[in-house]
Each structure stands twice: as structure tokens, then as C-alpha cells.
Image (cartoon, rainbow, N blue to C red):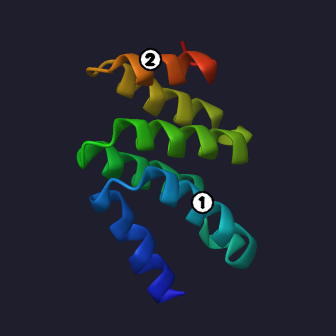
Amino acid sequence: CRLEQTRLEALPQEKEGAQVVASLARLSGKYGPQITPALYRSLADKLKGAGDTTGAIDVLAAGHEKFPQEAQAFVKDIDALKQGKLDPAQVEKLKALGYL
């Protein structure tokens, strides 16, 4: 489990948003209680910090879908991303996901 966590924490530095989403989905089955809304939001923040805004959007959207009871927190984080500079593809992604 520690190795998985270390690997998961390293992915945002490599701007691997899609890998983060896939890893979270895979690990949810194996380590369910350890895969929390806070983990999704933390990894999205790390992706944003690494310059992968698209990856951050993907992770937040996946977390929002997985944890509907935490919708307000995920929407707040997505709203914060919308305040930054978004490229046209990111704007389209947010529209397609229903956030714009």
C-alpha cells in the first residue's frame, strides 16, 4: 500500500492526470476507505501546481462523481480553477462536464 501511495503521489509531478484518475479508480476497489475525497482534491491541487490544469479538472470531476455527498467541495475547487487561465480545450471540457 505504501508503494502504491508513493507512486500515486508522484504522478502529479509528471503531469499524468489521466493516470491519477485511472489509479484512483483501480485503488478504490483494493483500498476503498483510504481513497477519500480529500485525496482526490489534494492530487488535483498537485496537478494544478505542476501545470496540468486539464488533469486537475479530470481528477476533480472523477471525485465529484465518486463522492456526490462532497459535491460542494469539488464544485468549489472547480470554480477556483475557472478563475485561472484556461485554454479552449479546458473550457470545452468544463462545458462538456456541465461546470460551465
Query: Which residue is found at the position 45% from the left and 70% from the top?
Result: 8
Report helix, strand or loop for mark 2: helix
The extreme front residue here reads 89
The quadrant of the picture occupied by the C terminus is top right
Query: Which residue is found at the position 32% from the left and 18% from the top?
Result: 83
Image marks 2 and 1: residues in contact by CB distance under 8 Å = no
Read off the residue under disc 1.
22
Is 37 located above or below residue 95 in the figure? below
Residue type at mark 1: give it: Ala
Residue 22 shown left or right of residue 18 in the figure: right
* Residue 1 in the image, given as x and y percentages of width and height: 54, 87
* Residue 94 in the image, given as x and y percentages of width and height: 52, 21
Read off the residue under disc 2.
91
Disc 2 or 1, which lies upstream in sequence?
A: 1
Q: Foreground residue, 2 or 19?
A: 19
Is 74 located above or below residue 59 in the figure? above
Q: Foreground residue, 17 or 65?
A: 17
For residue 92, say whether it is visible.
yes
* Residue 24 in the image, given as x and y percentages of width and height: 59, 62
For disc 2, the neighbor class at 10 Å (few under 14, some 14 to 19, many from 20) is some
Residue type at mark 2: give it: Val
The extreme top residue here reads 100
